[in-house]
Amino acid sequence: MSQSRSVGGTVLGTHLGLVYAFLYVPILVLILLSFNKSGLPTAWGGVSLKWYVALARNSAILSAALNTLIVALSATFIACVLGTFLALGIELRRKGNDKGQVVDTLLMAPMIIPDIVLAIALLSFFNLLKVGLGLHSIIISHAVFNIAFVCAVVRTRLKHFDYSILEASIDLGASWFTTFRRVLLPAIFPGVLAGGLLSFTLSVDEFIIAFFNSGSGQASTTLPMQIYAMIRFGVTPEINALATLVMLVSITALLASQRLNKAPRTHE
């Protein structure tokens, strides 16, 4: 029995190693090539930071990075505010409500709908309202699907919250606003921050929705759109350096989001 378990563990470990290699070896190669002095993927010329220096001097990339930062921060702020209040409204009202599954399905829709479908729907919506396209349309578009992610993260936090504390606060004479500001918000703030970091990451990486709902010109070009425009002429070490930085920001934000979204320990 122990021998069969050992063989099974070896097989599973080998399978897991192959999966990780398939997922992460291309990423490691990309990171390594971003430090290649020669600039050729087939010839190693030594370690150099010249491509990162060239990246910092590229005005088009810096402009796109600034646009991406504006879009991500603005969409994250809108999504955090609306997503948090949406989560509170659902969790505080769903007790005894038999329509919980319907509400959950509607909330999940922006998360599971293909990006191309959501992009076309948002573009049609803007055209219907005769709203011009630009950074503002990208911000609104990103906020639409980010609200669902923030709401899901905050609801996870609320499932571990003791609502009797709110009743005690009100019984002691505190108003609803004071109760929210002094009691509820500090308790769920790690979840709000985790949802915000996830929202920020999704906005930084998102391409299809931004591509469909952006205006013309460099003024509304985000970083993923700039990368797409550059790789049409071939992948250069400068793009590898840019992809490495974007990936580093995304991974850092995701790790921070997961750490903050850990369920609080309950003390019995």
Image: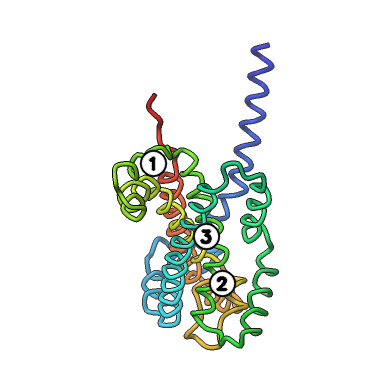
Q: Residue at x 34, y 56 (%)?
A: 177
Disc with the residue nearer the chain's start (3 vs 1): 3
Up the image or down, 264 lies above or below 40; here it is: above
Q: Which mark is residue 30?
A: 3
The C terminus lies in quadrant: top left
Q: Quadrant of the N terminus?
A: top right
- Other-residue count near label 1 (Cα within 10 Å), few / some / many at <14 / 14–19 / ≥20: few
Three-letter code for the amino acid on which mark 1 is drawn: Glu
**22 displayed left or right of 52:** right
Pointer 3 or 2: first along the chain: 3
* Image coordinates for residue 47, horizontal then vertical, percent: 40, 61
Q: Quadrant of residue 122?
A: bottom right
Work out whether mark 2 precedes mark 1 in sequence or the reverse, and give the earlier one: 2
* Front disc: 2 or 1: 1
Mark 1 lies on a secondary structure that is helix
Amino acid tagged 2: Ser
Q: Position of residue 231 (x, y in %)?
A: 58, 74
Which label sits in the foreground, 3 or 2?
2
> Please, what secondary structure does the residue beneath circle 2 have?
helix
Q: Which mark is residue 167?
A: 1
Q: Residues within 10 Å of mark 3 (few under 14, many from 20)?
A: some
What residue type is disc 3 on? Leu
Residue 165 is drawn in which quadrant?
Answer: top left
Q: Tell us which disc is closer to us: 3 or 1.
A: 1
Separation of residues labelled 3 and 1 (CA atoms): 55 Å
Q: Are marks 2 and 1 in contact (CB under 8 Å)?
A: no
Q: Is residue 114 visible?
A: yes
Image-quadrant location for residue 241: bottom left
Does the image show residue 32?
Answer: no
Q: Nearer the viewer, residue 19 or 73?
A: 73
The residue wearing badge 2 is: 141
